[in-house]
Image: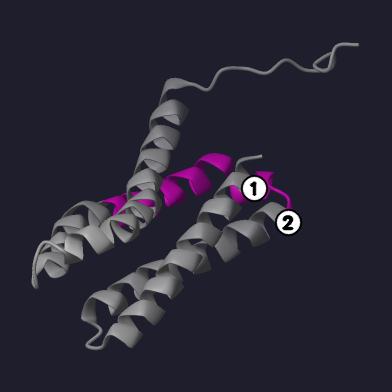
Amino acid sequence: MHLLASSQLQLAGGLSVLRLSLHVLAATVWVGGQFVLAGLLPTIRGLGEGAPQKMAQAFGRLSWPAYWLLIATGVWNFIAVGPANASSAWNAAFGIKMVCVIVAGLGTYLHTKAKTPKARGIYAGVGTLASIAALALGIAIAG
């Protein structure tokens, strides 16, 4: 029994490959970078008193452009799919994903402005959890 008897899978066109590649690359930097930085933090702290702040600033120069690229390619994805062509469940998941993206950016921004370790930890957690939720919803809506 052939699973694709009624339809054949097709390769994505050039613009779709570009759009999705940029989106995945930006997600890799934004979400993956958070995990890499968190994993390196004990080592970074051993490099001196100002090292964590310097590393965070350096990461910010990479991660914030990736965040804005995620938003831009997310809008591009939405336009490419066309909300009228999507199910109500897809549109709802996309809307929830966008809320998660906003919460992720806000949590991460507040993390950079927080004055106490407790506040930095809370905001980092909010930003990271919202980023993971956005990532999972992105996979769900990719179908």
Q: Which residues are magenta?
A: 66-87
> What residue is shown with label 1?
140
Tell me the colour scheme of the image.
Answer: one colour
Magenta: main secondary structure: helix
**Badge 2: how crowded within 10 Å, few (<14), some, or many (20+)?**
few
- Asked whether the residues under the numbered discs 2 and 1 touch, taking CB atoms below 8 Å apart as contact, a structural biologist would say no
Q: Is residue 110 magenta?
A: no
At x 21% / y 51%, what residue is drawn?
62
Q: Residue 38, relative to residue 13: is it above or below? A: below
Residue 3 horizontal/vertical position (percent): 83, 17
* SS at mark 1 in the image: helix
> What residue is shown with label 2?
89
In this picture, residue 94 sits left or right of residue 87: left
In this picture, residue 142 sits left or right of residue 54: right
* Front position among marks 2 and 1: 1
Location of residue 58 by image quarter: bottom left
Looking at this view, name the residue that lies furthest to the right. Answer: 1
Res. 141 visible in picture: yes
**Badge 1: how crowded within 10 Å, few (<14), some, or many (20+)?**
few
Q: Amino acid at mark 2?
A: Ala
* SS at mark 2 in the image: helix
Residue 38 horizontal/vertical position (percent): 33, 60
Location of residue 120 by image quarter: bottom left
Quadrant for the C terminus, please. Answer: top right
Q: Nearer the viewer, residue 20 or 118?
A: 118
Q: Earlier in the sequence, mark 2 or mark 1?
A: 2
Q: Amino acid at mark 1?
A: Ala
Quadrant for the N terminus, please. Answer: top right
At x 22% / y 81%, what residue is drawn?
113
Res. 56 visible in picture: no
